[in-house]
Image (cartoon, rainbow, N blue to C red):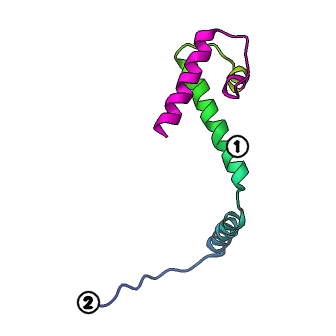
Amino acid sequence: MGAYKPIFSITNKMLENLTEIERARGFLDAASLSEDWVRRMSEQTILLEAHHTTHIEGTRLTVEQSAEVWAGRDVDANKDDIKELLNYRNAFQFIS
């Protein structure tokens, strides 16, 4: 049995699509994310995860209040809600 030799032709549309993919890939390869940006986005993601997770569990902090608490600032809010958010942060830090 001989080697498999598929018969196909590349259309202009296929070539355009491949060129577009290659252009996007080149852009992504050239793009570099600064360490500062990655750190800030990671911190923001953890904060939002903590806020929404504790909110589902019943806390009434706003995102803004959660950010203030997370940063160590005093917030005029329910002390149990604040404690819940900080406990989440401590647990996350412990497991990470």
Q: Residue at x 62, y 10 (%)?
A: 79
Q: Residue at 58% of width from left, 21% of height from top?
A: 85
**Residue 56 spot, x, y in % from top left:** 54, 19
User: What mark, if any, has residue 1 been given in the picture?
Assistant: 2
- Examine the rendered structure and indicate whether residue 68 appears above or below residue 29: above
Q: Is residue 7 above or below residue 14?
A: below
At 49% from the left and 40% from the top, the residue drawn is 96
Q: Is residue 57 left or right of residue 74?
A: left
How many neighbours does mark 2 have within 10 angstroms: few (below 14), some (14-19), or many (20 or more)?
Answer: few
Q: Outermost residue toward the bottom?
A: 2
Marks 2 and 1, how far apart at CA: 59 Å
Question: Of the residues under marks 2 and 1, which one precedes in the sequence?
Answer: 2
Numbered badge on residue 40: 1
Is residue 13 or residue 35 the one in the foreground? Answer: 35
Q: Is residue 37 left or right of residue 88?
A: right
Kind of element beneath mark 1: helix
Residues in magenta, as a range: 68-96
Residue placed furthest toward the top: 78
| Secondary structure mainly formed by the magenta segment | helix
Pick out the residue farthest to the left. Answer: 1
